[in-house]
Image: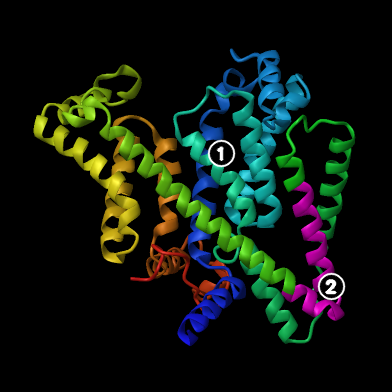
């Protein structure tokens, strides 16, 4: 009984004391924001046909659909060309800011608004990876994804150094952002622009209020215990969101694998053969013909895909098997990006898979990137901490499947 109580107390302390998986949450932040930004930039010449007011999915049809399903999109606040260009530009900028980890809590909110606005404006534009990006943009709001590999981490390190010298650290940007964000939210709410859905406005107002409380708790020394309480709540929310992201990735693979088993083409080992001969998925016809010419290879890839997807959730309890299968699945997605011409679908899935990468591997990878000449700050002497932020004092491990090998 005492052992059980001790285990429970350790588990509670582990979940509340610190955010688990700081490197995993950072890499999915970078992965999904990079995927979104690259997609918007690649489709910039075609933005009018995809999401513009003159696209095939008209503004009136989109408005009718969102009035029924209560989906959020800021693009329907106006049917003008100028408003569309502003929203598209803000979607790109918010993705870049989240990629860099600048004010990650605020930039993650703007990132979510940009993703939902574009995707809910034209619901038929996408290749499967858009669904993953849609969900992950919401989950990222709840994570503390700027703890490492971000401008936030570097600013926090500078603040700790200044406080150690007895200097007072002033944050002028945060209050300005908070005030402007509140004014915009208030104006949009009073104008009734959010539509019938309650989830997005409630989330935006909740985070806005939480950011205000966080700043007040850090500003006044008498609120030290209140700041600790807020930190515990933030850790719990982060760890819960990280668990949901991991469960979502497992659910995607499990459902995809079991549905494939029910298909006759996957059962007879020929399912991979047919997409290789579709014009829409053959950017390199010669390569597709080369792969499809060998029946044994097609059969092995077909059965191997099903086996990996069905087995992946069960391999999380064995680190070595999980790591091998994870590498195989990422390689497969990279092959899909090249052979079938689905780069952004593959990037989204690789970013989702990255939540299961071992912490030791991510730390080594971050160290090598930080030592690269292009990212090393001038005069730093190769200082990694100033380039990517401080290392956590105690490296917490996330949930099952993300432990160090």
| Label drawn at residue 134 | 1
Residue in view at x 38 percent, y 71 percent: 404
Residue 226: x percent and y percent? 79, 74
Q: Quadrant of residue 217?
A: bottom right
**Nearer to us: label 2 or label 1:** 1
> What secondary structure prevails in the magenta region?
helix
Over which residues does the magenta segment extend? 204-228
Q: Residue furthest front?
A: 1
| Label drawn at residue 405 | none
Q: Separation of disc 2 and disc 1 at Cα?
A: 35 Å
**Circle 2 residue:** 219
Residue 237: x percent and y percent? 63, 61
Image quadrant where one finds the C terminus: bottom left
Give 206 or 187, whichever is nearer the viewer. Answer: 206
Crowding around mark 2 (Cα neighbors within 10 Å: few <14, some 14 to 19, many 20+) is some
Q: Is residue 224 magenta?
A: yes
Compared to residue 176, the image places residue 79 above or below, namely: above
Residue 37 seen from this side: no
């Amino acid at each position: 009984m005492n052992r059980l109580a001790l285990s429970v107390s350790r588990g509670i302390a582990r979940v509340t004391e610190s955010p688990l998986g700081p490197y995993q949450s950072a890499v999915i932040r970078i992965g999904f924001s990079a995927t979104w930004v690259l997609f918007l930039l690649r489709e910039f010449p075609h933005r009018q046909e995809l999401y513009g007011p003159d696209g095939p999915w008209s503004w009136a049809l989109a408005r009718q659909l969102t009035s029924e399903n209560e989906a959020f999109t800021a693009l329907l606040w106006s049917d003008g060309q100028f408003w569309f260009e502003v929203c598209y530009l803000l979607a790109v900028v918010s993705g870049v800011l989240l990629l860099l980890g600048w004010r990650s809590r605020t930039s993650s909110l703007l990132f979510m608004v940009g993703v939902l606005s574009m995707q809910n404006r034209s619901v038929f534009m996408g290749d499967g990876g858009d669904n993953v990006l849609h969900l992950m943009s919401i989950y990222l709001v709840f994570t503390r994804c700027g703890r490492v590999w971000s401008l936030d981490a570097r600013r926090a390190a500078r603040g700790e150094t200044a406080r150690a010298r007895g200097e007072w650290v002033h944050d002028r940007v945060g209050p300005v952002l908070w005030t402007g964000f509140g004014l915009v939210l208030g104006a949009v709410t009073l104008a009734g622009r959010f539509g019938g859905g309650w989830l997005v406005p409630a989330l935006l107002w909740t985070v806005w209020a939480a950011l205000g409380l966080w700043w007040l708790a850090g500003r006044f020394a008498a609120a030290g215990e209140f700041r600790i309480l807020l930190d515990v709540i933030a850790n719990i929310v982060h760890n819960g969101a990280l668990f949901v992201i991991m469960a979502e990735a497992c659910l995607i693979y499990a459902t995809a694998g079991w549905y494939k088993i029910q298909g006759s083409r996957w059962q007879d080992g020929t399912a991979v053969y047919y997409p290789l001969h579709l014009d829409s998925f053959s950017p390199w016809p010669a390569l597709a013909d080369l792969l499809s010419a060998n029946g044994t290879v097609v059969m092995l890839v077909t059965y191997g895909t099903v086996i990996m997807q069905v087995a992946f959730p069960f391999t999380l309890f064995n680190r070595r098997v999980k790591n091998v299968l994870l590498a195989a699945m990422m390689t497969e997605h990279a092959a899909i990006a090249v052979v079938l011409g689905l780069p952004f679908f593959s990037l989204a899935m690789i970013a989702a898979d990255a939540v299961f990468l071992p912490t030791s591997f991510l730390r080594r990878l971050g160290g090598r990137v930080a030592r690269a000449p292009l990212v090393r700050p001038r005069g730093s002497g190769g200082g990694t901490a100033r380039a990517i932020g401080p290392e956590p004092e105690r490296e917490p491990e996330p949930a099952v499947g993300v432990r160090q090998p």
